[in-house]
Amino acid sequence: MEHNTSAINKKILLVGAEGVGKSTWINRILNGEFKRDLYPTIGAEGYILNHKQYDYQDENFRFYIIDCSGSDDVFYKGLGIKGYARSIDALILMADVTKPDTYKYWSLTAVKEIIIENPDIVVIKCATKGDRINQTYKKKIPDGTILISSKSNYNLYKPLDQIRDAFTKG
């Protein structure tokens, strides 16, 4: 079978509190290395993931991920995040399993508005440091959350796999 050279492009918005590991996760996928001390994202940064990992049958997926800063409440309350959310196909909500208060970013008004304004998007919830889970943290993890770890590679690609699968089933 001849491989389809055209790619299925999907735009993904990555949001979460400051320091949960959004940029570390992307760096691990792109460069295959874990870096603990990356500089915080200011505003937003875009990344293209075009990797054999995302091929499905004869379809090639290219993910354009917009990594949004988690450091500025104004960014989430103002126009910043909503501007990046135009025409997105998926939203990844990221938290840190060892910091339960980081889940609160998932329910901010701006995040809710993105979901309302983009009713057909795929929403993925994931929590970093999934390799450090214990019973105390486990009780506080929202239902449907994927545990991942950039350090150990635990479920590293699972959020992207679920997005790919959402567009190939049906």
Image (cartoon, rainbow, N blue to C red):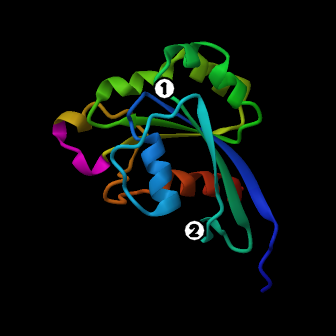
Q: Please report the bounds of the magenta region as a residue range.
A: 130-135
Q: Is residue 83 above or below residue 125?
A: above
**Residue found at x 55% / y 58%:** 161
Quarter of the image that includes the C terminus = bottom right
Question: Label for residue 106?
Answer: 1
In this rendered view, identify the residue nearer to me: 51 or 111.
Answer: 51
Q: Which of marks 1 and 2 is nearer the N terminus?
A: 2
Question: Label for residue 95?
Answer: none
Q: Is mark 1 on a helix, strand or loop?
A: helix
Dot 2 amino acid type: Gln
Question: How many numbered circles does the render carry?
Answer: 2
Residue 169 seen: no
Left or right of residue 154, residue 120 in this image: right
Q: Is the magenta stretch mostly helix, strand or loop?
A: helix
Q: Is mark 2 on a helix, strand or loop?
A: helix
**Residue found at x 43% / y 47%:** 24
Left or right of residue 136, residue 128 in this image: right
**Residue named by callout 2:** 53
Tell me if mark 2 has few (under 14), some (14-19) or many (20+) residues whose alpha carbon lies within 10 angstroms of its own. few
